[in-house]
Amino acid sequence: MRRKIYIILFSLFFSCSSNKRAVKIQEVGREFTGVITQDNLLETNNSTWFKPRYEAYEIEDTLISTFQKNLKNVKIKAFIGLWCGDSKREIPLLLKMLKQASFSEENIEIIAVDHKKKAKGIEKGYGVFRVPTFIFYKRNKELGRFVEFPVESLEKDVLKIISGKPYKHFYEE
């Protein structure tokens, strides 16, 4: 009799614990991938990390006009991971910097990738191996890319890229 009770209790214990794991996977394990907008970043799940960083960041006034001048005819593809600490650190700053420089949202495409750096095939051909990766184009020619974290600072790195000055991200030889 005791043995049956132990088997029943043992079964109940393991069946309950696996249900908890399934709920956690559904809540946490869903990775959103594909083209997103800044509005998507302001939605509930992402606003907890995006909004405070975005609102707190201020670009130096002296840099705004330099950015405005150099951002003409520039288009940006921003590959980010909504799960990635580096992306959470850099994308709010980049978007705030671009807004303060009056850069049109139409000229930036934000692509959310999963842990394998996949985004429904959108990522193919871009050589994204770390996130965030911000690729800057002028007249359909790649100017350069910011990968994962700044060499100097986000502002200085982006300014070097868009002004055509020599720039190598950390992983570039």
Image: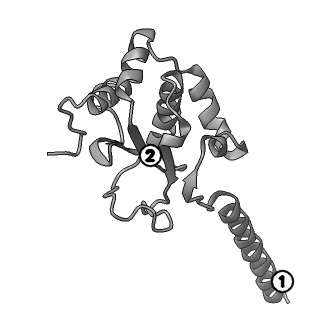
Q: How many marks?
A: 2
Q: Please tell me which residue lies in front, 133 or 61.
A: 61
Could you say where residue 31 lies in the image, as x and y percent from the top left? 58, 60
Q: Residue 130 carries which label?
A: none
In this view, 126 is above or below 167: below
The residue that appears at 52% across and 53% down in the rendered structure is 112
The residue that appears at 38% across and 65% down in the rendered structure is 124
Quarter of the image where one finds residue 148: top left
Q: Give the residue pinned by disc 2.
A: 78
Q: Give the residue pinned by disc 1.
A: 5
Q: Please tell me which residue lies in front, 156 or 26.
A: 156
Mark 1, Cα crowd under 10 Å, few <14 / some 14-19 / many 20+, is: few
The residue that appears at 52% across and 25% down in the rendered structure is 102
Q: Please tell me which residue lies in front, 55 or 4.
A: 55
Mark closest to the chain's N terminus, 1 or 2: 1
In this view, 165 is above or below 122: above
The C terminus, quarter of image: top left
The three-letter amino acid code for the residue at tag 2 is Ala
Quarter of the image where one finds residue 123: bottom left
- Residue most extreme to the left: 173
In this view, 118 is above or below 151: below
Judge left or right: residue 33 versus residue 141. Answer: right
Judge left or right: residue 33 versus residue 24. Answer: left
Mark 2, Cα crowd under 10 Å, few <14 / some 14-19 / many 20+, is: many
Q: Is mark 1 on a helix, strand or loop?
A: helix
The three-letter amino acid code for the residue at tag 1 is Ile
Q: Please tell me which residue lies in front, 119 or 72.
A: 72
